[in-house]
Structures are given as structure tokens and as C-alpha cells.
């Protein structure tokens, strides 16, 4: 199979969908790998390393798109890339379609086989291709939140850990999944007072076992959220329903009750965000203020640490990518039915139920097509 990888064009996105080691794995499996020149530089991978791995360096992204049967990326295609789609192309990347109708329509109209990292669910319920970025985004959320609490950026001027004789900052984490757990690790490690909320009592029991008396666990209800955020210095939004738009559990009305200069970091922004006042921002202009509360809503947070992020992501994506490349998408699904869960579009049909539900569109089970 001809497999391609192009430079990401999203604002300040420096990750790349394939490392030189990944390229070598595909080449060793008998595939032809086409890499856009310069694609890996943002993550510290040179063209020479890709060439040494057996990949072919191509001068233009269009030529790569036009030539390949499978495209391996990191982020969802942007509108300028939609004309490069072609029928039957396997697009293997994060798609986040529930918050992006234009991209959804472009994939359907071009009859692209859209295989989304974020909806691949293993038999044990884990989301292995989302997990590494969730871990990084969770840890970054506290790091970035701590920075934007500084007065220079409009924050209230609070140090998360405090110092002897001063109060510690209060951190409230909405959602106890992978993002929330990793945010909790960093917030606890930095010495903050941490409250974490989730609707799943079993998950809260698990978090209580891990962190013990160092955190407060609460059931996520409107009343509990409203009470907790009043005293919060930093709120982390980390709610996820795979493939679906994030529920708006952080209400606009809460902002006027919060401390002036408190910070809200919405890690769910790729799926539309879990805050009513959320809007997508970028690394070069990451924050805005609503009712005195600083909002950090960068849609590609792990892109700030591209070397770590690229290695972590491609460690997870390579094995499934090789299955698809070696057997073709259809046979790969038949041999490993987990891969069905990653197919969001196929032959002009919407094949992810949560995405279809987000738009009240018709859903087609991919098993009926393959």
C-alpha cells in the first residue's frame, strides 16, 4: 500500500503523524511511504532520518495526497485540505467530527474512509489512541492553568502550591477519566487543594484509592459543580463522550460567582468544549476573559510539546495502522473487529453513532458495509 504523511497546517501544530521509526516499520512490512519534505521538523525529525528509514521525500503536500491510498496524520484536515480528498482514501487521524460539520460533509462527499483515533475502543473499554494525548493534555492543563493564574496574564496572582503561611490554590477537575486523572496527578504533585468530580461512583472510588486523603471526590451534579467552582482558582474541564459533543456542564452563570482572575482550562474543546463560554483558541493567542474568568481553550494542547506528543501518539497508532496497511481496511476490520469502532465515514455513509446523533443524521453500522 502507498502510505502518506504530510506536514500539519493547523495553527502552531508541530506534531507529525509518523516518526522515522514508524516509516521504517511500514517500509519493512512492504509498503511505500511518502513523506512531505519538512513534515517532521517541528517534532525534531529531519528529512534525512526519514530517507534513511526508506521513505520517499515529496516536495508538495498535494502530491502526497494525490498519490497515496492511506494518509496518516495527527489533526483533522482543514478546509484547504478538503479538495485533496479522493474516493477510497483511508484517512487515519484524529477527526473530532461531532464539532465539525463542514469536515464531516467533505469526507462524506468525497467518500473517504475516515478512521478516527478518538473513537477506537478496545474490548476492555479503553480508548488506546486517545489515551496518550489525554495523558499529555491532562498534565499540560495544570501546567498552563498555573501559568495563566499569574497576574501578567489576567489571573488572580495565585501560586498553586502557595508557601508556608499562605493558602494553597483550589483546583476543581470536571471529569475523572484519563485527562482528569492526569490533571489530578500534577495538581496534587504541585501541592494544590484538589477536588475531582465524575458521574461514575466506581471511578470516584478508584480515584479515592489512588490519591486518598490528598483529594476530595464529589459526584458531578449541577449543584456540586456550582458550589465547587465558587471557591476555585483553577477549573479543568475534562469531560469526554467518545465521538460525541461534550456536554456543557460548566455554565456561563457560574462565572459571575467565581473569583476574579480564576482560570478555566477546557480540555474538551476538540469535541465542542464542556463550557458554555468556550471558543477555540490557539497557542499564539491562547486565552480570553469572560466575566473576569480567564479561559484557556486551545484545541491542540499537546502540540505545545510536539516531540513528546508525537512519540507517545505514534507508539499507540502504529500497530493498528500496520493492520490496516497490511490487510486493507476491510480485512483488518474482519480480523480485528475493534477497528470497526474507529470508522467514522465509509463510502459516503456516517458510520459512528455518536457523531450521527450529534447531527440527528442517519447512522449506518460499518459492519453492514464491510
Image: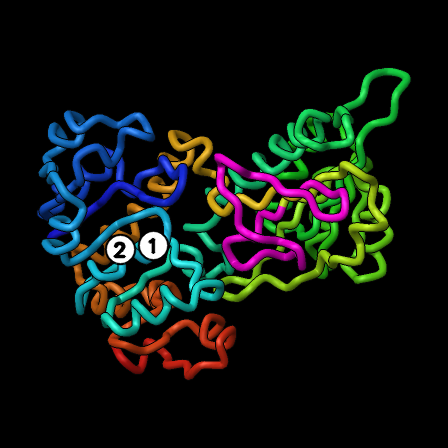
Which sits in the foreground, 251 or 140?
Answer: 251
Outermost right residue? 165
Quadrant for the N terminus, please.
bottom left
Magenta residues, start to end: 266-294
Snapshot quadrant of residue 88: bottom left
Residue 72: image x %, image y %?
Answer: 26, 50
Tag 1 residue:
78
Q: How many marks?
A: 2
Quadrant for the C terminus, please.
bottom left
The residue under the point 30% across, 64% down is: 114
The residue under the point 65% across, 34% down is: 145
Is 220 located above or below residue 182 in the figure? Answer: below
Kindly identify which numbered label has been placed on residue 81: 2
Q: Is residue 211 left or right of residue 39?
A: right
The residue under the point 68% across, 43% down is: 289
Snapshot quadrant of residue 326: bottom left
Residue 270 within the magenta-colored segment of the rendering:
yes
Amino acid at each position: 500500500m502507498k502510505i502518506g504523511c504530510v506536514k500539519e497546517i493547523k495553527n502552531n501544530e508541530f506534531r507529525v503523524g509518523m516518526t522515522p521509526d514508524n516509516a521504517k516499520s511500514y517500509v519493512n512490512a512492504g509498503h511505500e511511504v511518502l513523506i512531505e519534505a519538512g513534515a517532521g521538523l517541528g517534532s525534531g525529525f529531519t528529512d534525512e532520518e526519514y530517507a534513511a528509514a526508506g521513505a520517499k521525500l515529496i516536495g508538495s503536500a498535494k502530491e502526497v495526497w494525490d498519490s497515496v491510498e492511506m494518509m496518516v496524520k495527527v489533526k483533522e484536515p482543514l478546509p484547504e485540505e478538503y479538495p485533496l480528498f479522493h474516493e477510497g482514501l483511508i484517512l487515519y487521524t484524529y477527526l473530532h467530527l461531532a464539532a465539525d460539520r463542514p469536515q464531516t460533509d467533505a469526507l462524506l462527499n468525497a467518500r473517504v474512509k475516515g478512521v478516527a483515533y478518538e473513537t477506537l475502543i478496545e474490548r476492555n473499554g479503553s480508548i488506546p489512541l486517545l489515551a496518550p494525548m489525554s495523558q499529555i493534555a491532562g498534565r499540560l492543563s495544570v501546567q498552563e492553568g498555573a501559568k495563566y493564574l499569574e497576574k501578567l496574564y489576567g489571573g488572580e496572582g495565585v501560586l498553586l502550591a502557595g508557601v508556608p503561611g499562605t493558602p494553597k490554590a483550589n483546583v476543581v477537575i470536571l471529569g475523572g477519566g484519563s485527562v482528569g486523572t492526569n490533571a489530578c496527578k500534577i495538581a496534587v504533585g504541585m501541592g494544590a487543594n484538589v477536588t475531582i468530580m465524575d458521574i461514575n461512583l466506581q471511578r470516584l472510588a478508584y480515584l479515592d484509592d489512588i490519591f486518598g486523603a490528598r483529594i476530595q471526590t464529589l459526584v458531578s451534579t449541577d449543584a456540586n459543580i456550582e458550589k465547587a467552582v465558587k471557591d476555585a482558582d483553577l477549573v479543568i474541564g475534562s469531560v469526554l463522550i467518545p465521538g460525541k459533543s461534550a456536554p456543557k456542564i460548566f455554565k456561563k452563570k457560574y462565572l459571575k460567582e467565581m473569583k476574579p482572575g480564576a482560570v478555566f482550562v477546557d480540555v474538551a474543546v476538540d469535541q465542542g468544549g464542556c463550557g458554555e463560554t468556550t471558543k477555540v483558541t490557539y497557542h499564539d493567542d491562547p486565552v480570553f476573559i469572560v466575566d473576569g474568568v480567564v479561559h484557556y481553550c486551545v484545541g491542540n494542547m499537546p502540540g505545545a510539546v510536539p516531540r513528546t506528543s508525537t512519540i507517545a501518539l505514534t507508539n499507540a497508532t502504529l500497530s493498528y495502522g500496520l493492520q490496516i496497511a497490511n490487510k486493507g481496511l476491510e480485512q483488518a476490520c474482519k480480523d480485528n473487529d475493534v477497528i470497526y469502532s474507529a470508522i467514522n465515514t465509509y463510502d459516503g455513509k456516517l458510520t459512528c453513532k455518536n457523531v450521527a446523533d450529534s447531527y440527528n443524521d442517519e447512522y449506518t453500522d460499518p459492519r453492514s458495509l464491510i
